[in-house]
Amino acid sequence: MASSDPIYLRIVEDIRRQINDGTLPPGAAIPSRAQLTRKYGIGETAARHALRVLASEGLIFGLIGSGHYVSEKPERTALHRLRFHEHQPPFTVDLQAQGRRATCDWRSEHTSAGPDIAQRLRVEDHTRVTRTRYVFRTDGAPAQLATSYERTEYTDGHPMPAEGNENGRKSLLVRLSLLGIKITEVVESVYTRVAQPVERDSLDLPAGAHVLHIERTHWAGDSPVETSDIVVPGDRFRLVYTATAPSVG
Amino acid sequence: MASSDPIYLRIVEDIRRQINDGTLPPGAAIPSRAQLTRKYGIGETAARHALRVLASEGLIFGLIGSGHYVSEKPERTALHRLRFHEHQPPFTVDLQAQGRRATCDWRSEHTSAGPDIAQRLRVEDHTRVTRTRYVFRTDGAPAQLATSYERTEYTDGHPMPAEGNENGRKSLLVRLSLLGIKITEVVESVYTRVAQPVERDSLDLPAGAHVLHIERTHWAGDSPVETSDIVVPGDRFRLVYTATAPSVG
DNA sequence: CAGAGCGATTTGGTGTTCCAACTTTGCAGC
DNA sequence: GCTGCAAAGTTGGAACACCAAATCGCTCTG
């Protein structure tokens, strides 16, 4: 706000305000670079810099040869995560529960745990674990990128197939229950960060896009059984956690 | 990766790779604009653009007169959210539970519900509600910005004081239990977005910073009792959700 | 040897210019 | 009236230049 602020920030704040208060509704055209330079009496550098900042924030988007336009307000699909009911173990709700066409492909392999995964699974470095990379798609669009790590000792009896799709899918809980292992606790740790190149490729994200990163660990008593990293496009989803009091049916 | 990619992206990917694989550890100096132009045989525009992109992603930061340096890997403080135990209502864990010096100031007022809040509280537009703005600080630094809305009918008996700090704080649950209202369900919806100017001011964030936005609603049976918007700096915190199976003590 | 001071270096803001790729528009010709 | 093409407008990449503010290192002085 200070008059000592750089010029381009003044433009940014001005346009942002117009978008917020509805003067520029979604779909409206932003003045072009040439128009901005005339309107505000600035150089082209400042004008394009302002547009770049607004575009990188997702408020507007540019079309080569056409112009810049106000983005639609992002509708974030609810992704139901942990849900708790009495007399049921904690579980995560599948994408299918959304009533959308969802598919899942995975690739599974044995590998050795790095320091981070080793700590989360409470094993030594280089312990052999089963790593499975999942790609979830909803309505054809990539929706989640998940990497799951299981302690191989637990799952050797009923191992993951090397790869497959949703048809051959057996949930973690089913496979573990066959081994007499009961999940007693699930912990999810959520944070946001910039998408890495691999994730941008898999999830079809632009440079600088933010993702929600979920570190999930399933516990059986005091032993972590499985841990996974789940990466979700930050502009397309919201995570919903529901908790129900035990004494109510 | 394609050779048709713009030059500045090649530089970005090259430096990003060096940061990721440890060639450039946190604190290491990035080559200056002049050095980059010589090293890659590019113009100054491309060099500074590459540095700007990396800086906007938070991977590096610039010091006027000194240079660009690799950022520390962000340590995100765990913010324990919903936790569920048998025979206890769902509750959110306070900041104090972190073992840190935390303070809280708030300002409370009666106002009329806008369409968004009205929908979440299942009331008509313009129904009178109690709005309370909280600012939580941890170790002196602003940590959370929360805006809570309560249906005035529930809380008129034991209203919020107009303003106060952590010393005069009575939790929502305590006030409601005095009125015989028992929270049976808590729903938290989490997403990430760019911080708005007001939030940047309150939380001391740079332009373009991302926040975690939590929409939380407390339910008593089928009636929403309180709903709040909780905004948390995305680079300083992670949200931890813990679920324990009912049948285990 | 300590400290002051100056100059080289670096970032960040801004202006100007040029170009390639693409879209939109309007006009000419059928 | 319709088609097709050319011109004008727009974005995005890139180069170059200039300046203010800040930092850093070296030198010179006391």
Image (cartoon, coloured by chain):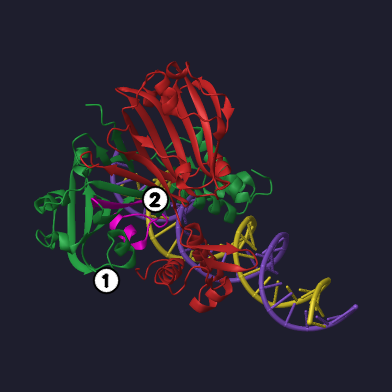
Chain colours: A green, B red, C yellow, D purple
Residue bounds of the magenta highlight:
A194-221
Q: Mark 2 belongs to which subunit? A: A
Q: Please indicate whether residue A159 sits to the left or right of residue A11 in the image.
A: left
Q: Nearer the viewer, residue B90 or A4?
A: B90
Q: State the quadrant of the C terminus of chain B.
A: top left
Residue drawn at x 22%, y 35% is A85
Residue drawn at x 56%, y 67% is B68
Residue drawn at x 51%, y 78% is B39
Where on the picture, by quarter, is residue B69?
Answer: bottom right
Question: Disc 1 marks which residue?
Answer: A126
Mark 2 Cα shell of 10 Å, populated few (<14), some (14-19), many (≥20): many
Where on the picture, by quarter, is residue A240?
Answer: top left
Mark 1 Cα shell of 10 Å, populated few (<14), some (14-19), many (≥20): few
Residue drawn at x 18%, y 58% is A106
Q: Position of residue A53 (x, y in %)?
A: 51, 51
Q: Nearer the viewer, residue D27 or A247?
A: A247
Question: Disc 2 marks which residue?
Answer: A191
Q: Please indicate whether residue B74 sits to the left or right of residue A11 in the image.
A: left
